[in-house]
Amino acid sequence: MKQIKLVITLLFLFAVGMGYAQNSGHISGDVCFNGMFYIPDSLIGAEKVESKVRANSWLNLNYNNGGFTLGARYEFYQAPLIDFEKIGYKGQGITHYFADYKTDLLQVTVGTFYEQFGSGLSFRAYEDRQLGIDNSLLGARFRVNPYKGIAVKGVWGIERNNFDFDYTKRSDMIRGVDGEVSLDQIFEKLQEKGFSLAIGGSFVSKFEKSTEYQGFIPPEKVPQNVGLHAYRINFGYKRFRLEAEMASKINDPNLTNDFIYKKGEALLVTTTYSQKGFGVSASFIRADNMDFRSQRNISATTPILGINYIPAINRQYSYQLLGNYSYASQPNNQIGFQGQVNYQIPKKSKLGGKYGTDLTFNYSRFHTIEQIPVEEALSLGTPSGTDGYTSSFFKFGKDLLYQDIGFDVTKKINADWKLMLGYNYIDYNLLILQGHGELAHIHHITSEVTYRINRKHALRGELHALFTKQDMGDWIYGMLEYSISPNWFFSVGDQYNYGNQAEAMRIHYYNFSVAYVVGATRIAANFGKTKEGILCIGGVCRAVPASYGFGLNITTKF
Amino acid sequence: MKKTVFLGLFLMIGLVLFAQEKKAQQFPSVDIKTLDGKAFNTKDITNEGKPIIVSLWATWCKPCLAELMAIDDLYEDWVEETGVKLYAISIDDPKTASRVAPFVNGKGWEFTVLLDQNWDLKRALNIVDIPFLCILNGDGEIVWQHTSYAPGSEYEVFEIVKKIANGEPIE
C-alpha cells in the first residue's frame, strides 16, 4: 500500500509539474482546522481531558487536467476532539489518495474512492467528517457507459478502518458490481409518453479469512465469503414516481446478529407525487439482519467498516432540542414508514399573502420486526450457529422504536419579517435507541423569526421548547443571531434543562459565537457548554460527551 | 525520503497556486443525477453563454433553505433582467434524496434541481460546509463563490450576476 501512496505522490508531482510547464491543469483544495480548548465541568459531566487543546484538521488537494484527476488528503487527528477520540478516530496520515481518469465512455479510479450502488442497500462507501465516518475503499473502481442509458460499475478494495493502515494484517476485501439500464433512454417512445423507467441490480461480496471460533461456530463452518444481491426499479409517469430497492444477504454470522445464519433482507420503497405548490411522499422500509461489515467482530454501536447503508427514512430535523431524540437506523431490525405532505398556499392569494405560505405535515412510525425464535435457539440459550428466528415479512413487531407527528408553517409576512412555527409529537424508545431508560413521550414546539433591519443587517431568533415526563424532563432553548451580510455572524444561545427532576441538574448550556466569512473562507470562534447526547447525521448516530470550553473553526477552499 | 517528497510537493503546489492565481477554475465534470434518476454530467451545466448560479444545499440545511427561498422571491426578476439560471444541487443522501422532488415542487421553486447523493461533486469542488454558492460565467468558469448565508447576501449575488451579464469585470 505504501507503494501506491508513493506512486500517486510522484505522479502528483509529475503531473503538477507538467501541467505548470504547459500552463494547463488546475489545483484546488480545502483546509479545515477544528480546535477546542477544554475546561472541566463536573456538573455537566465534562471530564478533565488528557490534553486540553485538541483539534481535528485536514488538507485536501486535487489536481485536474482535462479528464485526469489526482487527489490526496492529509488528516491530522493526533489529539482529536474528545468525541472523536471516544470512537477511536485518532491518528494521522495520508488517508485518501487517488488517480482518476474519466471520459464519456468510462472512468477508472485507482487508490481510495467513494461509491454508491442504487440507494445504498447493497453498497455505499461514503464519508461524514462530522461523525468521524470514512469507509472509503482502497483499491480500484471502474464505471462504464457502453451505450446511452446503460451504466456498469465495479469496485474492488479494502475498506478504511479509521487510522489503522497496516493492510498487511487485513484478510478482508470487498468486491462488487452494479448495472443500471435506463429503458426510456433506449426506447424514446416511453419518454415521449411521459414515462421514465430504469432497472438495476448489484452484487457485492465480502471475503474474510476464518481462523477461529465465532460464537459456537467452528472456524471451518464460518463462511469466508458473504454475498449480497440487490435489485431496484425507478419508475416515473408524469408527476408520479416510484423508487424501490430490495436486497438479500446470504449466511453472515457476525457479532451484530449474535452469529446466526439467517438470510438478511431489506426493502425500501418510496412513492412521490408532486406538482407546483404541492408535493406528497410516502416511504416504507423493512430491514432484517442487514448489518453488513468488512469484519465479523465489530460491535453494532461502532460506526466502522460498514459496507452497505440502511437509511433512517424519518424526517430529519436540525432543531437543537430534538437532537437528543433523533431516530437511529436499525439495520438488523426495523420496519416502518414515513409520509410527508408539502403544500404552498399560492403566492398573491388571500390566505397565502404576497409571498405564499409553506405548510409541511409529516408522520412516521418505526417498530422492531416480528421475531419468533427457532427451536434450536431456545435449547442453546443463545442463537449462535442457528438460523436465529423467523419473521413474517410485513408484520410489525411489538416494540415501538420511534413515532413522529409533525406540522410546520413558514410565512414571509412582508419584505422584512419571516416567521416559522412548528409542532412535533414524538415517541422515542430510549432503551433500544440509546441503551437506557424507557419509552419517552415528547412534545416539541419550534418558532423562528427573521427580521431584516435593512439590506445588510438582519436579526434571527429561535425559541424552542421540549416537554417530556421521561428522561431529563423539560427543556427550553433560545437563540439570537445578528448578521451583517455577507461577512459577520454573532450569536448567543442557551439550552436550559429547567424541568430536570434533580434540581442540581437544571443547567444552562449557553453558547456564544462569532463567525467571519469572506468568499469560501469561514473563521468561527465559540465559547460554551455542550450537553452529553447523541449526534445524528443521516440516521447514523454517535454519542457526544459533555464538553465546556473555547472552540475555533477555520475552513477554506482554494 | 518521505520528508523530501512532502517538501517537494508543497513547494510545487505553492508555485502553481501562485502562478494560477488569476486563472479561474473550470466547473468540474462529475456524474450526478437528475430528479428522475437519470445520469447527469456536471459539464452539461450551461446557459447559452449567460451567467449561472450553482448552489449546493440539502433539505435538512436550514440556512440553505433560507437562501434559496430568498432567491426564489427575486428569481423571476433576475431571470428577466440577466437571463441567469440557477442550478440547485442537493447533497441529500439516500435517506432523504427521494423526497427532494416533492419538497422542491411543494415550495414551487423554478430552479433546475439535481442530486449529488454520495457527495462526488461536493468533494470535487472541495466544499466543507453548505450552503455553498458559486457563480459561473458564460464559459463555465467559477468566477465567484461564497459559503454560509446571511440574509441580504442574495443582493450581492445579483450584483455579480449583473456584472457578468453585462460583460463587466467583477472586482
Image: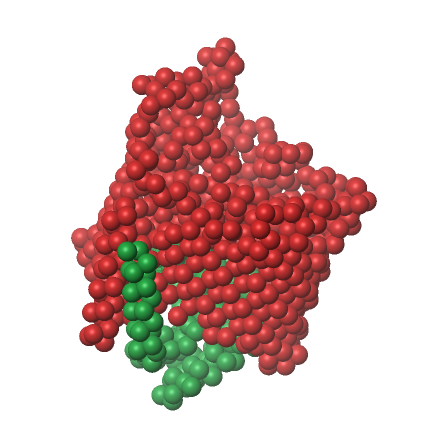
Chain colours: A red, B green
Residue A221 appears in the picture as rendered: yes
At 67% from the left edge and 33% from the top edge, which residue is drawn?
A438
- Which of A387 and A301 lies nearest the eye of the viewer? A301
At 62% from the left edge and 73% from the top edge, which residue is drawn?
A483
How far from the left and from the top, in percent, is residue A421? 67, 60
Please give the count of numbered marks on the rendered protein.
0
How far from the left and from the top, in percent, is residue A256? 47, 30
- Which of A188 and A1 lies nearest the eye of the viewer? A1
| Quadrant showing the C terminus of chain B | bottom left
B113 in relation to A438, above or below? below
- Which of A401 and A475 lies nearest the eye of the viewer? A475
At 54% from the left edge and 52% from the top edge, which residue is drawn?
A81
How far from the left and from the top, in percent, is residue A344? 56, 63
A468 in relation to B111, above or below? above
At 68% from the left edge and 50% from the top edge, which residue is drawn?
A40
How far from the left and from the top, in percent, is residue B156? 50, 80
